[in-house]
């Protein structure tokens, strides 16, 4: 028996479904080939680990803890309905109001400094310059 056939039959050997003649050839090959015997050893260890994993028992209180968490989550869901109304309607409205107040305060504070400029007396020269544009100079020359 060669290594390729041995590796194909290794599962049947572990299950015990290999015919007696093939089983004897398989065991003789394992005595000669270290590589195939190492693979068989690794598979046996893997089977032991898997069988140990299957024997681990679950915690009987696990379902009770999960149900308690779920029931607590349902209470949070009813409170979160109020939060969504608050979050979707009231919060954006408050943000808009705060922004509007900020803009009006900014404009108002900005205009406080300009109030002196608005109430300052206009010099007479500027008044005459404006009159020159409105009235024609020919009126004064014809007299």
Image: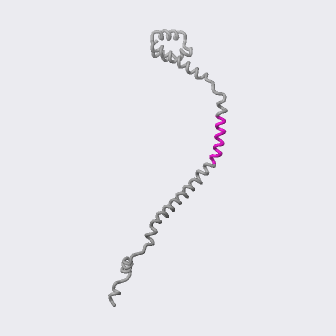
Q: Measuring from the top left, give residue 28's x and y in whole percent.
A: 48, 9
Is 14 in front, or is 130?
130
Tell me which corner region of the image, top left, top right, bottom left or bottom right, holds residue 140: bottom left
Q: Is residue 101 left or right of residue 77?
A: left
Q: Is residue 72 left or right of residue 8?
A: right
Give the farthest residue toward the left: 141
Q: Measuring from the top left, give residue 25's x and y in whole percent.
A: 49, 10
Q: Which residues are magenta?
A: 66-81
Classify 134 as above or below 59.
below
Q: Is residue 109 left or right of residue 141?
A: right
Q: Give the quarter of the figure containing the C terminus.
A: bottom left
Name the residue located 45 percent from the left edge and 65 percent from the top edge.
Answer: 113
Name the residue located 48 percent from the left edge and 17 percent from the top edge.
Answer: 39
The count of marks equals 0
Q: Measuring from the top left, give residue 98's x and y in whole percent.
A: 54, 57
Classify 121 as above or below 46.
below
Is 29 in front, or is 54?
54
Is 120 in front, or is 42?
120
Q: Measuring from the top left, give residue 87's x and y in whole percent.
A: 58, 50
Name the residue located 52 percent from the left edge and 58 percent from the top edge.
Answer: 99
Magenta portion: prevailing SS class: helix
Give yes or no for residue 67 being in the magenta stretch: yes
Name the residue located 58 percent from the left edge and 20 percent from the top edge.
Answer: 52
């Amino acid at each position: 028996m060669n290594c390729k056939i041995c590796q194909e039959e290794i599962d049947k050997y572990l299950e015990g479904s290999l015919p007696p003649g093939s089983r004897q050839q398989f065991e003789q090959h394992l005595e000669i080939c270290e590589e195939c015997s190492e693979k068989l050893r690794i598979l046996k260890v893997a089977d032991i680990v898997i069988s140990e994993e299957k024997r681990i028992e679950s915690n009987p209180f696990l379902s009770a803890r999960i149900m308690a968490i779920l029931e607590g989550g349902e209470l949070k869901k009813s409170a979160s309905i109020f939060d969504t109304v608050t979050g979707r309607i009231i919060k954006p409205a408050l943000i808009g109001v705060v922004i509007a107040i900020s803009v009006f305060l900014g404009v108002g504070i900005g205009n406080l400094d300009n109030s002196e400029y608005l109430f300052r007396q206009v010099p007479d020269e500027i008044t005459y310059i404006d009159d020159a544009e409105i009235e024609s100079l020919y009126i004064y020359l014809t007299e």
